[in-house]
Image (spheres, rainbow, N blue to C red):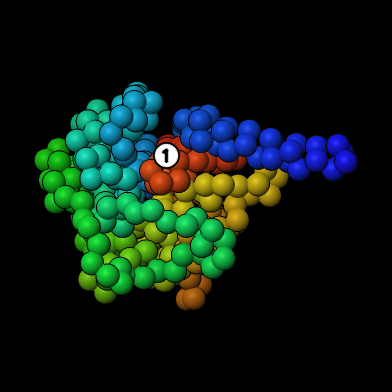
Amino acid sequence: MRKTIAVPLAVAAVGVAGLGYAAGVEVNLYRVRRFELPVLDPGSTPVKILQVSDIHMVPGQRRKHAWLRSLAELEPDLVVNTGDNLSHPDGIGPVLDALEPLLRVPGVFVFGSNDYYQAKKLNPTKYLRRGDRSHAPKRERAQNDWHELQAGLEKHGWLPLNNARGSLELGGRRISFVGLDDPHVKRDRYELVSGGPDVDAELTIGVTHAPYLRALDAMASDGLPVILAGHTHGGQLCIPGYGALVTNCDLDTGRVKGLSTHTAPNSRTSYLHVSAGCGTSRFAPVRFACPPEASLLTLVPRR
């Protein structure tokens, strides 16, 4: 009888310990992952891009705040912010302050649904049942003051790319961008930005928050050599040795984070980098086998 009772108690103890680790330890184990992308012309000087994503800032997150400020020490040439900066309506001031050292660097950004809409309680098991389909909000939802967030980023010269194209001069070279508003809530309108790479730029980069296949197909089909996205949290709760169970979109779990490629129906292929992000919803503040991250992407000449 004692053995029968001991087994479930042991399992429960392991589960509680794992939850404590996921909520109290790994969620603060910030790291920088590094990748090289051979996409520049031969003889070109490398370009260092820092991608930050899914910050989900809540007031009082001192460790995250300090780590974000420290990223300026990487001395990137460009910062790409792929959205979901907020998880609390009062997070705008804290996230802008955390990003302040990086705002001195040229940057671009798109928004995710959590920039527009206030975070709400949810049942996380729905992702295991059916994922989370792309959908516009079915009812009126409380909004964040995303206009204030956008103004705070633009004030420092960062370029908004929500269904927009743009370009920046980086040390005498022109880098162009094709951006989409968040496909997760069906705000993407690729027809407004289609047209392929900027012929006057050294490189054109696609930027979107959520890596839904329709967005990736459109960008790759259009000949964009690089696509940057976030949204997935890298699966957030992963199984060691196996990986992510879900991606929170229709992307396969094999590409839930990191560098891969995407081939469109017309057989054109782009590099795809999906950031696992550095935060979580305040209603699900856990990570397991998927540490919070930023990515330093070094663009180098083609081999």
Q: Residue 129 versus residue 45: which sits nearer the camera?
A: 129
Q: Can see residue 279?
A: yes
Give coordinates of residue 174: x percent, y percent: 24, 48
Q: Residue at x 22, y 40 (%)?
A: 90
Q: Is residue 302 visible?
A: no
Residue extending furthest front?
Answer: 1
How far from the left and from the top, in percent, is residue 254? 60, 56
Amino acid type of the residue tagged 1 in the rendering:
Cys
Quadrant, the N terminus: top right
Q: Secondary structure at mark 1?
A: loop
Residue 229, position in %: x, y? 40, 53
Residue 39 or 119: which is nearer the viewer? 119
In the image, 88: left or right of 301? left
Relative to 202, is 90 on the left or the right?
Answer: left
Q: Position of residue 209 (x, y in %)?
A: 35, 56
Q: Residue at x 31, y 38 (%)?
A: 58
Residue pictured at 14% horizontal, 38% vertical: 156
For residue 126, side relative to residue 230 (left or right): right
Q: Nearer the viewer, residue 189 or 22?
A: 22
Asked which quadrant contains residue 219, the reply is bottom left
Residue designated by label 1: 278
Residue 237 as seen in the image, left or right of residue 180: right
